[in-house]
Image: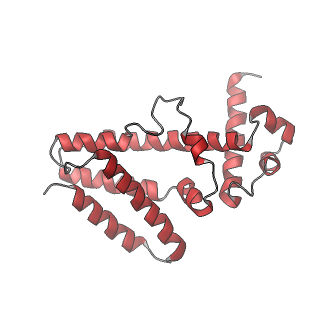
Amino acid sequence: MPEKTLKKIENSLINAAYNEFLEKGYQRTTLKDISKRFGVSNKNTGKMFRYKKDIFRAVFEKERINGYKKLEKLFLKVDTGKTEDIKDVLNKMFTFVSKSRFLEMIYRFGDFPLGYCLAETDNKDGEPIAGQTTLLERFIEKCQIKGVIRKEDPVLIANAFRNLIFVFLQERRYMKNSKKTDKLMVKIFIDGLLIK
């Protein structure tokens, strides 16, 4: 079978697995469930992915790479010396990340093998997964060089951003209408970053 066809089949299997994980979480999803949704036997699924955690790693990688590309595109368009541009791009970034079905799934079920995925450093696009400078941290550093964002550790700022997203996801589970609160928190966060 041509490699292009195999890649297309593998991608369809990854999408089927993602939908199963969205509905049931990691623990309650079985290889049989994924195979059934994909429309093949367990044996055929096993030819592509031996273990469920390997399928989840493929889902994780796909989401990570897609998210990275979208954010990279967003950051490339901004003038890191203009306050209004930075405010706009950070708002768009918060909106994009906070609407992620993947992150919501991870938070809601909390049973995915993230350590297994994060331990993998040999990724296709050459970007670091853990323990190295991220796209967001590099963007923050560029803004700091231009004197627009306060001089705090870019890693701490990126982690504060991640924590804020975690708060958004938590709020959504318990509050019916948290959009106004989310917008206010983002405004306070962004205003606190910028040098007036």
Seen from the viewer's position, the closer of residues 154 and 42 is 154
Q: Is residue 38 visible?
A: yes
Direction left: furthest residue: 196
Quadrant location of residue 163?
A: bottom left
The relative height of residue 126 versus residue 146 in the rendered view (above or below) is above
Q: Is residue 80 visible?
A: no
Tell me if 195 is positioned left or right of 20 in this view.
left
Quadrant location of residue 164?
A: bottom left
Quadrant location of residue 14?
A: top right
Q: How is the image coloured?
A: secondary structure
Residue plotted at (69% across, 60% down)? 23
The relative height of residue 5 versus residue 103 in the rendered view (above or below) is above
Direction top: furthest residue: 2
Rendering coords of residue 193 (x, y %): 23, 56
Quadrant position of the N terminus in the picture: top right
Seen from the viewer's position, the closer of residues 70 and 112 is 112
Rendering coords of residue 3 (x, y %): 70, 23
Residue plotted at (68% across, 57% down)? 25
Tell me if 70 is positioned left or right of 123 in this view.
left
Rendering coords of residue 181 (x, y %): 37, 73
Seen from the viewer's position, the closer of residues 131 and 90 is 131
Rendering coords of residue 161 (x, y %): 37, 55
